[in-house]
Image (cartoon, rainbow, N blue to C red):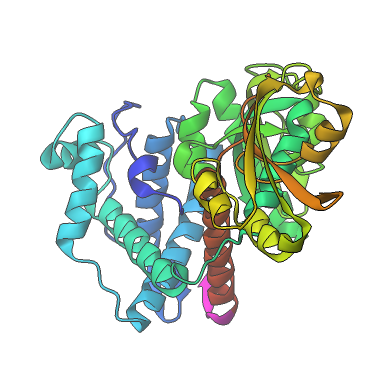
Amino acid sequence: QFKQVSAALAVLAVALGAAPAVAQNAEGVAAVVNDHVISTFDVRQRASLLIISAGIERTPEMEQRARQQALRDLVDERLQMEEAAHFDITVTPDSINRRLLDIARQNQTDLDGLAASLARDGISINTLRGQIEADIAWQRLISGLYGSRVRVSDVEIRETQQRIAANATRPQYQISEIFLPAENEQEFTEMEQGAMRLLEQMQRGAPFPLVARQFSQSASAAAGGDIGWIAAPELAPELQPVAERLQRGQVSLPVRTPTGVYIIAMRDRRAGADAGTTSIVSLQQVSAPATRQNAMERLQRRVENCASLDNSVNSIPGATLADLGQTQETELSSSIRDRINGVANGHASSIITSGDQINFIVVCGRETGGGGIPDRDEVESRLREQELTMLSDRYLRNLRREATIITRSQ
């Protein structure tokens, strides 16, 4: 749910050539965070780790950008560690070693080999250990504070599925993103300049996923910026016209939005499904006497799939279940098409009255040329992830505002 260090640093095997060893003497102060000093050595070490892991060249411009990112990361990690300590959260060396071992295995080496690889680039293994420690501590803090409190309602899940279903006929994009947050004009200017430097590096051959893992500040960073298939209306309004123009394999220029600066890569694109022509649906209808209105309303709200529908219907006296089969949506009557329009897989239409009977229709499955609609568990997981990420970002912003932070230009 947060930027995963193990995923972000699984690329250390990409060789960029040995960097000169960094001497740790005569170091200056890069920042003071609540009386804790972050040295220029700390910043240079982290900046080198960012550059190596992202597969980018050591140009003066990129080193400057990497130092800015490194300082921000180190300030945030100091605040995270202080807050974790306030809640008596500690991270054992064994926990850090297990994460280091995962990174080593992903790079087909062991812990000694990983340390030696970093040392060849002038980076101490302790730099990576510190990043991992802060990452684990912050995850535990956020999970402990919010993990059991985040609730995704059936209404949210249903509305999300319905929105996805309604967007199935719109253009679909498979996109990766790099997001650099900004809150004021100075930060927007800095982030736009930084985004241009990252773009230049990618034009020289730096892989988009590696750059995204190291520099992007969105939840997708752990996946190399991959946000999967998304319908055009689900993008930020500023990104929609950009995505419309991009062809497969193209990367956008930096795009300013109200929350920061984006670079997006168009990995693939497809037309939306033709409305009603390529959609195949499986339907079941539940009917009951009108006197059972309350029971039917409760069932209609609870429906999540068709697997257990039979047992639920049997619990309502006089209710019946009819299998309407599987058919193309164009072959349905217009009245039924209208009733299931926007209804997601596993959910029910609204209830209608027909004489002394009432009924609703359940969409057991729907497949379209634009791709299937995600099931309930997938949507719930996605919404929960978004909520936890939002809470984490808000928490960290508040810590920054309340802290005493003195920094020197990098």
| Total marks in image | 0
- Image side of residue 326 versus residue 102, left or right: right
Q: Position of residue 317 (x, y in %)?
A: 61, 58
Q: Which quarter of the figure has residue 324?
A: top right
- Image side of residue 255 versus residue 179, left or right: right
- At a point 62% along the width and 48% down the height, the residue shown is 180
State whether residue 35 is above or below residue 60. below
Q: Position of residue 314 (x, y in %)?
A: 54, 52
| Residue 183 in view | no
Tell me, yes or no, whether the highlighted magenta stretch contains residue 403: yes
Q: Which quarter of the figure has residue 226?
A: top right
From the viewer's side, name the closer residue of 248 and 360.
Answer: 360
State whether residue 167 is above or below residue 42. above
Specify start and end residues of the magenta stretch as a single range.
Answer: 402-410
Q: Which quarter of the figure has residue 101?
A: top left
- Image side of residue 230 versus residue 351, left or right: left
- At a point 25% along the width and 72% down the height, the residue shown is 90
From the viewer's side, name the closer residue of 329 and 104.
Answer: 329
Q: Position of residue 257 (x, y in %)?
A: 77, 48
- Image side of residue 2 versus residue 334, left or right: left
Q: Position of residue 235 (x, y in %)?
A: 74, 40
From the viewer's side, name the closer residue of 196 and 393.
Answer: 393
State whether residue 56 is above or below residue 75. above
Tell me, yes or no, whether the highlighted magenta stretch contains residue 343: no
- At a point 70% along the width and 18% down the height, the residue shown is 270
State whether residue 256 is above or below residue 232. below
From the viewer's side, name the closer residue of 87 and 143.
Answer: 143
